[in-house]
């Protein structure tokens, strides 16, 4: 969606916002990561209040997130080659 010629008129406001940010002359790399590879982020996104854009600082992970964080850590590859 982000690389489509029509991305700046996409029906999703998030896509339009990302395209606008990418046109600011910054060096931007977009990397797609499958939900299954980052279950903690996926769970947080699903819990988010889509009507609010407030920043929430968490001092420790919510209880529902702890098993997912452990799974993400255990399945992470530390290969740098």
Image (spheres, helix red, strand yellow):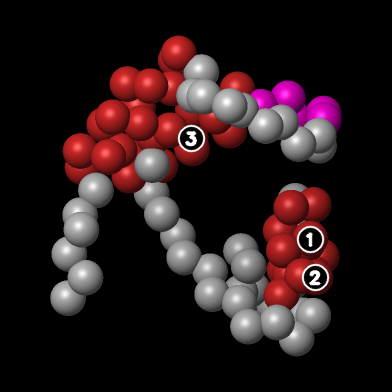
Q: Can see residue 31?
A: yes
Identified at 32% across, 44% down, the residue is 37
In x, y percent, where is residue 45?
58, 33
Q: Secondary structure at mark 1?
A: helix
| Dominant secondary-structure state across the stretch colored magenta | loop
Q: Answer with left or right where residue 30 lies relative to residue 80.
A: right
Task: State if disc 2 and disc 1 touch (CB < 8 Å).
Answer: yes
Identified at 77% across, 80% down, the residue is 23
Q: Residues within 10 Å of mark 3 (few under 14, many from 20)?
A: some
Identified at 58% across, 27% down, the residue is 59
- Residue extent of the magenta highlight: 48-52
What residue does disc 3 label? 42
Q: Quadrant of the C terminus?
A: bottom left
What residue does disc 2 label? 20
Q: CA distance from mark 1 to mark 2?
A: 5 Å
Marking on residue 17 = 1
Q: Nearer the viewer, residue 52 or 6?
A: 52
């Amino acid at each position: 969606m982000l690389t489509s010629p029509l991305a700046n008129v996409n029906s999703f406001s998030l896509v339009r916002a990302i395209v606008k940010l990418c046109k600011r002359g910054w060096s931007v790399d977009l990397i797609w990561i499958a939900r299954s590879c980052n279950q903690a982020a996926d769970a947080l996104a699903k819990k988010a209040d889509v009507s609010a854009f407030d920043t929430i600082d968490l001092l420790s992970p919510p209880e529902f997130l702890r098993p997912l964080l452990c799974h993400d850590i255990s399945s992470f590859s530390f290969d740098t080659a």
